[in-house]
Image: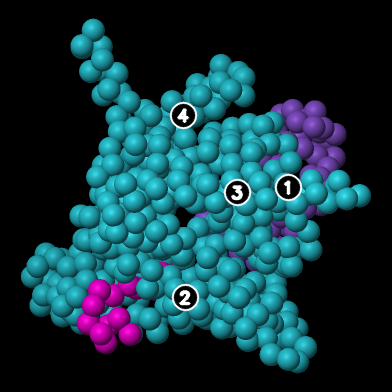
Amino acid sequence: MDKFLKVLVDVLSEPSVLIALIALVGLLAQRKSLSDILRGTTKTFVGFLVISAGAGVLAGALAPFGEMFKAAFNVSGIVPNNEAIVALAVNEYGSSTALIMFFGMIVNLLIARFTRFKYIFLTGHITLYMSCMISIILTVSGFTSVPLILFGALTVGIFMSLSPAVVQPFMRKLTGNDNVALGHSGAVGFAVGGWVGMLVKGKKEITSTEKINFPKGLGFLRDSTVSIALTMAVFYVVVALFAGADYVESNLSDGKNHILFALLKAGTFSAGVFVILSGVRLVLAEIVPAFKGISSKIVPNSKPALDVPIIYTYAPNAVLIGFFSSFAGGIVSMLIMAMTGGIVILPGVVPHFFTGSAAGVFGNTTGGVRGAILGSFANGVLISFMPILLIPAFGELGLANATFSDSDFGVVGVFLSGLYNMGGKMFTMIGIGLVLLIMLLVSLRKQNSKAEQASEI
Amino acid sequence: MRILTVCGSGLGTSFMVEMNIQQLLNEMGVNGVEVDHSDLGSATPERADVFFLAKDIAEGGASLGNVVVLDNIIDLNELKTKLTAVLKEYNLL
């Protein structure tokens, strides 16, 4: 019996198996055919192993970057890239990540069913990344076993319901209806974009970004393999130049020319992200459709919260302006960090593109061109400084030269670690419970006022 | 017939369009169509017969061959109209 139990524990603490079992549950719940179940479960299992393999590739590129950066500037340089940090964390935190994600989705369903927060968060990779971050922070805060999964799942579920709600006022203004929501980890940054737009719009009629002529031809930026390789090449070469040929060639590259070495490692970074993304795609291929199918049965009047590109077609110029302006915010922030001599957060092209563009779109909706430029700039500054606050919360992984990139990771992370620093685990648990309670109370009040209105009529 | 939906990093948007196409195919009772999603970088012409992508990356995907560009990726009616046209083209409807 003991032996059997040990095998069971071994199996369940193997994240690849665990995530495959979750996919299996989803497939069974949908009453899929045997061949679909076999195929889907296997793909999920392999997908997780692909993520681990990508982590190895990525680490091989990230480690020399960290060393060159230290040698060149005597401080740590950190690349904000969700795929990178998740892949690096997944071996140690994979099992708790998988369980927190699974139960977090159930919490999201329950909140949507029983409160006025009707959002079903369908952007699966963000759920996965958020579950991973929460798993790291709660583990560092001393949570283990059942409490870790329970409070982790509650936090993920709350995030999945609240994050779309934060952006929804601006979504209504942009799309003209209330049927679709935005599900992304940049929600606070998007809302900041919208608020800044409101502040700067002035008294005159606003000029929309879509009224101006803006150069096209930057489509290649949308190909993440290309844009990551190119921007990382710039960073790697600059850092290699500052570290010096002597240092690189005698310590890292085995005598290979330092510029060539830098370019190869930049390419390797992009290759690692490419592999990790294929793994993430395999892992989510069965879980997201199952979640979508089940949610439409349990919460028929739900609003799907979808990935951020759904808003790009509303204001294509604002997308580009937002990206450039957010990136500029990232560069300014980087220079400030370099001058003050602390840890330096490098501006990643992927987060600035996906979140900056959305902040630009919402800034344009509320404040025209000025709103788009300043709103996305504010987002760029926000996502540059947030990661610094997170570093202590990640324990050993804080020193990994990579970190989570979007604004909501910062907000959720600072919330959890702030509570823990104030009053330990008890405060963390009370804090999470309080947020849930407030969401319930808000829903009750709304229902009451609706009932009152109905009785008056 | 094979359909590939494409977006920038092949995670969220293309996956959503894929699920919507699956749902429409089920509703219309059409069989024999394989649907998958991909990032722009890994999408190559031989991977599918028809490619669905949003207007904002239409430029990057123009070389894929038979490309269907969606003006509004959350508009199910537009998707249905364009999917129906494709299915008729391939004599599946």
- Residue at screen point 55% across, 62% down: A187
- Residue in front for this viewpoint, A427 or B43: A427
Q: Earlier in the sequence, mark 3 or mark 2?
A: 2
Element type at mark 3: helix
Instruction: Name the residue beneath numbered marker 3.
Output: A441
Q: From what the image shows, is residue A300 above or below residue A10?
A: below
Where on the picture, by quarter, is residue A77?
Answer: bottom left
Looking at the rendering, which quadrant does residue A263 occupy? bottom left
Identify the residue at horizontal 74%, vertical 86% (top origin): A206
* Amino acid type of the residue that numbered disc 3 sits on in the rendered structure: Leu
Q: Nearer the viewer, mark 1 or mark 4?
A: 1
For label 2, the residue is: A380
**Distance between the Cα atoms at labels 3 and 4?**
32 Å
Residue at mark 1: A448
Q: Residue furthest top?
A: A1
Nearer to us: label 2 or label 1: 1
Per the rendered image, the range of residues in magenta is A336-350
What is the crowding at mark 3: few (fewer than 14 residues within 10 Å), some, or many (at least 20)? Answer: few
Q: Position of residue A97 (x, y in %)?
A: 37, 41
In magenta segment, residue A454:
no
For label 4, the residue is A22
Residue A183 is left or right of residue A149, and the answer is right
